[in-house]
Image (cartoon, rainbow, N blue to C red):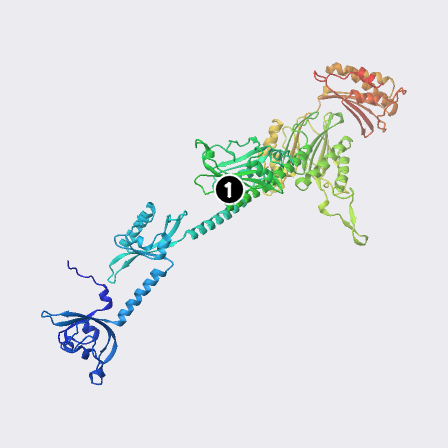
Amino acid sequence: MWQNSPPGSLYDHIRVASFSLGTDGRIEQWSTRAAELFGITARQAVGRDPQEVFAPLDARRGRHRAEAPFLGEGGPDGRAWTGLVPYQRDGRQQGLAEIYVMPSEDGRGGRAALCVAVDVRALRGIETDIAASEAVFGQSPLGFFFFGTDLTLLRVNESFAQTFGRPAEWHRGRTPHDFLPRQEAERLTAALRQVLDSGKPVSDIQLVGPVPGRSERRRWSVSLYRLHSGSGRPIGVAAIATDVTGRRRAEREAAGVRRNLALLNEAGARIGNSLDLETTARELLAVAVPQFCDLASVDLYQGLLVGDEAPPGLADGSAELRRVAYSSAVTGAPVDADYKPIQVGEVHRYPFHSPCAQALRTAHVQVVPGREGEDGAELGAAVHSTLAVPMVARDMVVGLAQFSRTKGSEPFGERDTALAVELAARAAVCIDNARLYRREHERALILQRSMLPPGDPEAAGIDIACRYLPGNAATEVGGDWFDVIELPGHRTALVVGDVMGRGLRAAVAMGELRTAVRTLAMLDLEPAEVLSALDEIAHGLGRPGGKQSASRGVRGSVRPADLSEVYLATCVYAVYDPVTRRCTVANAGHLPPVLVEVGEPAMLLEVPPGMPLGVGGEPFEETEIELPDGALLALYTDGLVESRDHPLDEGLQAFREALTDPGRPLEDVCDHVLTALDTHHGEDDIALLMARLRGLKPGCVGDWTLPPEPRSVAQARELAREQLETWGLTDLVDTTELLVSELVTNALRYGEGEIRLRLLLDRTLVCEVWDGGLVQPRRRRARDTDEGGRGLQLVGLLSAAWGSRRTPHGKTVWFELSLPDADSPAPDAVEALLSLY
C-alpha cells in the first residue's frame, strides 16, 4: 500500500540527489535535487560524460583527466561503487559529494547505472548528531527512556536499566505496568498520556517501587516531555528518571532534625511556665503528643511530691511513684511499659526487674519493644515500641517519662531517643524547680501564717473581723501584719504594721517585729512606750551586732549604715479598755485608723503620724479617745487604699464610703470593703483589721475601794463572794475568796495607800487589786520550814493566768479564772493547798 511520506523525514535532512547513466556511460537522467545540489541544470548534464560534469575546471581544459572507476570502455562496468567526488558550482569548488553507484539493466540487457549523491557535509553532520545523541543516551548517568505514541517503551539506556534492575533489552515493548506497582504504574501512564496529549512537560513525578534483588523500596524522580519530528508531529514521550532514594532519606533525616529542633524550641516555650508539678508534667505531654509519640505518661516519686528529700527506695527505683499526667492520641486506657492500666493520681511501684525500674535505677533510657497481644484487642498489641526515660535533675532522678508509638508510626530511632532524653531532662529541671519552690513556699507559708493571729480572734468587749491578702498570690508572703493581743483587765491591743519591702526578707522582719510587739505588750506598757521600744529594735535589725547606728570608715570618719540593711516599718498600736470605753492610739508613720460611729460618716482619727520604725531618735505621741458602744474601728495597710491607678486620697475616700453601713455583720463589712475597693492590683500586701466596740455591760463590773487596814481582807472576800453569787458563779466562790485574800494581804503588806478591788466578767473572770506601791510582786519557792511565801504560788496553781503591771500611781496585780462548764470544772482549792506541802 502506497503512503505519502509526511514532511520532516530523514530525506529532507540529508538532501539525497539522484541521476542515472545509460549504457554508453553518459548521463541519461538528472533529478531536480541533483540540479540543486551541484548547481548544474538537466540540460547541461544530460548526454554528457559524468567525468566532464564532475571534473575540475582545469581537467576540463585538458590539463589532466581522471578516469571514473565505475566506467569501463563502453560504459558502466556493472560494479557497485561508493566514493567521494568533488563538485563545483559557478566555477568554484563547493565541496565533496558521496556518490553511490548501483548497477542496473535496460530492457535489452544493456548495463546502465543509477547513482545517488549526498553532500558529505550534511551526511557528516547527521552522523555527528547521531553519535552525540548515542553518547548522551548511552553514557549519561541519568536514566533515559522513550515511549511511543502507544505508551510502550521503545528504548532505554543502561542507566535506566540499572536503576530499575533489569537489562535494557528487557524493557523494549513494555508498559509501566510491567516494572512498577499497579498504583505507581497508573500514575505514570496518566502522566504520559497527559504529556502526549497536551505537549506540556511534567517534572519531578515521585514513583516508589521495588527493585529485583533488593529488599529496600526505591524512590525515583521522573520528568516527561513530548518528542516531535522535524515537521512537528508528536512521535512519543521522552523521560528522564533519577534514583532519589538517598536524597529522600537525607531529606527525611533533615526534616526529622528540623522537627526535633522545632519540638525542642516549643518545649522551651511551653514547659515550665507554671511552678506547679502536675501542670509542668502536663505541659511536657502537650508538647510530645502527638508531635513526637502517640502515648505518653509521667510518674513522679511520691516521696518527693510530699516534700521528702530522698524517699526510701529512691536509689534502686523501688520507691512509690504517682502518675501525675497521661496523654494519648489513640483510643484506649492509660498504660505503662508493661501495658498495665494505671490511672492518673494512682500510686504504684514498678517490679524490680522491669525496664521502668531499671531506667529509674540506672538513670539511663530503656527501649521497650512492643509485644503481640494474644487476641489483638488490648492496647499493648498496638504499641510497637516505648521509651522509658528517667527524669534527671541535678543528678537526682525525680520520676519517669514514657513515650510510646503505635503501629503505623515510624519506630523510635537514635535521634528520637536523644530527643526524648532532652525533653525529659528539660521537664525534670522544671519539675524539680517547682518541687523546690513548693517546699520553700510551704515553709514561707508556715512562717507567714504563724505570724498572723488565728482566723477568728476573740477579745473582751470587741467583735473582730480581719483579712490578709498577699500582693503576690504565688508566694503569699509579705511584710504586712496585724495582731489582736489580750491585755490584763480585759483590755485589747489592736496592731497593724507594714514592713517596707516584699518577699521572705520582709516576712522575716515582720515576724521579728510582731514578736517584739507581743513581748512589749505583755509588759503592759503605754502605746507610745511600745512604739519607742519597737523603734529601737527595728533600728538594730539587719545589722551585725544588733543596735548600731553607724559604722566607721577610713580615717575614723563615721558613715551611715548601708540602707539595704535598714528595716523600716510603719505601725499603729491601739489599746481599748472595754470598762472605760476609752482607746489609746499611737502611730509610727502609718495611715490613721478609720472610725465609724452609729449614724455618722466614717472619719480618719486625728492621730500624730510619727516617724516609721527603724528611723530612730524621734519620740512618739499617743491620743486617747472615748468610743461609744457600737462604734467601728478599722485599721489597715496602704495596699488597701493606694494604687498606681489612683492617688491615696481617692483610695481613702473610697474606703470611707465603703464603710457607710457599719451596722451589718462585721464579716460582711470586710467582704464589702474588699469588693468595693481594687484589691487585686497585686502591687502590695493588704491587711485589714476591723473591731466593733461594745464594751462590758455595767452589770459585769464590780469595783470597790478599801482602806489600807487588815479588816479589808475579810471585806474583800465578802464583796467577791456576793458579786460571784450575783453572777451565778458559785463554783468559783471558794477559789476567788482564797486568791482575793492573798492579793489584798500582799497589798497591805508590801503596797501603799488605798486598795482597789475590781472584778470583771466576760469570757473569763478577772480580778484586779490596785495599790500605790511600786514594788512588783515576785514569785519565789518557799522552803518546807517557811510559814509564808506561798501566796503567789497558790495564785499560779489555781488561776488560768496572773501577773502585775504598772499604773500611773502604783501597780495592779491580777489573776484570771476560766468560767466553769461541764468540760472544765472549777479548780479545787484544797488540792492546790495540799500540793504546796
Q: Position of residue 291 (x, y in %)?
A: 47, 43
Q: Quadrant of residue 727?
A: top right
Q: Say whether residue 752 is left or right of residue 697.
A: right
Q: Say whether residue 485 is left or right of residue 221.
A: right
Q: Position of residue 276 (x, y in %)?
A: 58, 37
Number of marks: 1
Q: Quadrant of residue 202?
A: bottom left
- Farthest residue in the right direction? 785
- Name the quadrant of the N terminus: bottom left
687 or 401: nearer the viewer: 401
- Name the quadrant of the C terminus: top right
Residue at 34% over, 60% down: 138
For mark 1, give the secondary structure.
helix
Q: Quadrant of residue 119?
A: bottom left
Q: Amino acid at mark 1?
A: Val
Q: Is residue 202 visible?
A: no
What crowding class fits label 1: few (fewer than 14 Cα within 10 Å), some (14-19), or many (20 or more)? many
Q: Is residue 444 visible?
A: yes
201 or 442: nearer the viewer: 201
Q: Say whether residue 33 is left or right of residue 812.
A: left
Does 782 appear above or below 239?
A: above
Q: Say whether residue 24 is left or right of residue 360.
A: left
Residue at 60% over, 43% down: 644
Residue named by callout 1: 287
Q: Position of residue 345 (x, y in %)?
A: 55, 31
Q: Position of residue 393 (x, y in %)?
A: 61, 42
